[in-house]
Amino acid sequence: MRDKLQNIKNEALALIIAGADQAEKDRLRVHYLGKKGVLAEIAKEFPSLASDEKADVGELFNDVKQAITNALGTVQAESGGAALPSVDVTLPGVKPPLGHLHPVTKAIAEISSIFERIGFTRVRYPEVDWDWYAFESLNMPKGHPARDEWETFFVDAPDHSKLGKVVLTPHTSNGQVREMERVKATPPIRMVNIAKCYRRQSDVSHTVMFHQFEGLVIDEGINITHLKGTIDHFVKQFFGPQRKSRLRPYHFQFTEPSFEVDVTCDICNGRGCKLCKEGWLELGGAGMVHPNVLKAGKIDSAKYSGFAFGWGVERTYMMKSGIKIDDLRLLYSNDIRFLTQF
Ligand code: DAH
């Protein structure tokens, strides 16, 4: 009896789906579901079933009846007929899969809001820019060896007579003199420039395209304590209140003095472990804006001073407690299995 029911179902659905017209459907309805229809005939055999079979076959019988009714109804509704398929409106809905923002987009939003709350303005400057903004205005004249640190992509485009070649920005520091121009050389400046950067590097800890966030503050009387205070504030907000920062002397052409900023390791909390060796992880560069940079932005360095910092978004995000990404390139491989973890 089970086979019989199954065959009836297959046969009926095949006939309906094959595109029966309205008259044909009416005929099929009577044939299968009518008072003297195929299913009604079968139901007559019910009493002869063994009692343990009854429940099972009964369930199949209902299923077949429902399937044929639905198929007739749906096809009828599609072709403009009056009958609608039976819908159980009390059934729970099927949840559509929900996406979320990319982890780097989330990190950028969090970084922006931390700085915005202490008076910085989020700005954006070109990611394809002139040599002048990326290097020369930052105290790196043409041919200066310090330029080698940035493995720069040059764009095959005509040079500008004053601003030089076109580059894919290798850092967000190109925003510094652009911001000085935006405020027409009149501080105060409190900017955070977050943008894509490009360097000819690709391995587990580098991607050709990455992001940096660049802070720049210029006003009267700005000194290193303002830099240290701002960094501490960011570190505690982004990484957690237990994390500390330190400034380590370094060299950049566009700052004097210059520093590398370190943050205590989240695993050993600054005591030193296998991962960090001495308890500190490197965040990125910072320093007091070099007078030549202020001059390039037409700002009077006798009256104004400033600090700047520029750090990688991906690197900073990875240093956040609990997030370990073995290969940074995974962030941009568009593999949903990887991205859904964040
Ligand atoms: N632009 C530097 C880099 O990409 C980072 C940097 C260092 C930015 C010192 C700054 C700074 O603003 O003051 O490596």
Image (cartoon, helix red, strand yellow):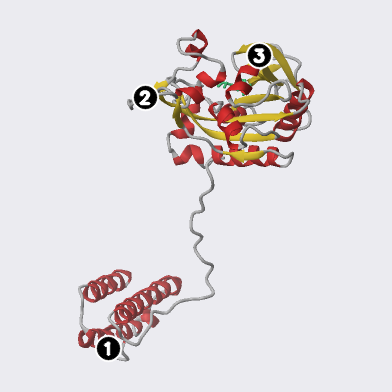
Q: Quadrant of the C terminus?
A: top right
- Which sits earlier in the primary sequence, circle 2 or circle 1? 1
Check disc 2 and give the amino acid type. Asp
Q: CA distance from mark 1 to mark 3?
A: 79 Å
Q: Which residue sits at x=54%, y=67%? A: 92
Number of residues whose C-alpha sits closer than 10 Å to that of mark 2, classed few (under 14), some (14–19) or many (20 or more): few
| Near-viewer residue (291 or 213) | 291
- What label sits on residue 274 in the rendered view? 3
Question: Mark 3 against mark 2, which lies toward the viewer?
Answer: 2
**Residue for badge 1:** 30
Residue occupying the far bottom of the picture? 35
Do the residues bearing badges 3 and 2 touch, measured as CB atoms within 8 Å? no
Residue 298 lies, in percent from the top left, at 61, 26
Q: Disc 2 designates what residue?
A: 159
Residue 42, how many percent across, how many down? 31, 81
Which numbered disc flags the more N-terminal residue, 3 or 2?
Answer: 2
Q: Residue furthest top?
A: 145
Is 29 on the left or on the right of 270, as rendered? Answer: left
Q: Amino acid at mark 3?
A: Lys
Q: Quadrant of ligand 1?
A: top right
Q: Secondary structure at mark 3?
A: loop
